[in-house]
Image: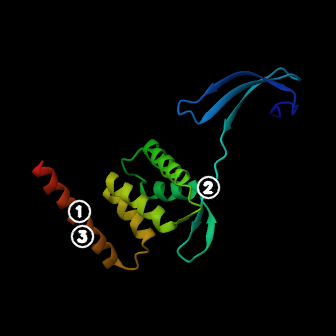
Amino acid sequence: MKCPYCSSFNNKVVDSRLSKEGTLIRRRRECEACLRRFTTYEKVEEIHPVVIKKDGRREPFSREKIAEGILRACQKRPISVDSIEEFIDSLEQSFQESGRKEIATTEIGERVMAKLHEWDDVAYVRFASVYRQFKDPNDFVLELQELLESRKKKEIKNKKK
């Protein structure tokens, strides 16, 4: 490991700790040349699946793209960044655990929309308008009607309990 202060490669590990989630190892190091300390993090390298786009193109899985879309939909909504990060972590982990080498963007989009529908109707409609490529106001109206119908069904189900 290269010292960030003097660029020497001679250093020793002074302390190692596992993160709360158990996914990272934090290491305190001391440079033997300049005697300054610095922190490094070790993480298992994950092999992500390839994403199949709607037009058939393939590109690497990008957590950042998913986060960007969700954050844009949730802008000025009462959804915490921590909740978004936790969801993206679980989404990424489920793809890792599935062992599949390819995942369609439709699957990713549907799972994101399901979570947004659970969290916030406005964020859901924002995301759906981009994801489903609404062309005119009628597309919004249809989506809102479906949203209102599902909300009514939930209310009826909750009253029966």
At x 56% / y 77%, what residue is drawn?
A: 55
Label 1: which residue? 150
Dots 1, 2 in contact, CB < 8 A: no
At x 37% / y 58%, what residue is drawn?
A: 114
Q: Quadrant of the N terminus?
A: top right
Could you tell me residue 80's position as x and y percent? 42, 44
Placement of 149 over or under 87, stated as above or below: below
Q: In this orientation, which residue lies closer to the viewer: 62 or 71?
A: 62
Residue 140's tag is none
Dots 3, 2 in contact, CB < 8 A: no
Label 2: which residue? 48
SS at badge 2: loop
What colour scheme governs how the chains and residues are painted in the rendered image of this protein? rainbow
Q: In this orientation, which residue lies closer to the viewer: 80 or 32?
A: 32
- Foreground disc of the pair 1, 3: 1
At x 49% / y 50%, what residue is drawn?
A: 88
Placement of 116 over or under 138, stated as above or below: above
Identified by mark 2, the residue type is: His
Label located before the other in sequence (1 or 2)? 2
Identified by mark 3, the residue type is: Gln
Seen as rendered, the residue at the extreme left is 160
Quarter of the figure with residue 139: bottom left
SS at badge 3: helix
Label 3: which residue? 145
Identified by mark 1, the residue type is: Ser
Could you tell me residue 41's position as x and y percent? 68, 34
SS at badge 1: helix
| Whole-number angstrom distance, CA of label 3 to CA of label 2 | 37 Å
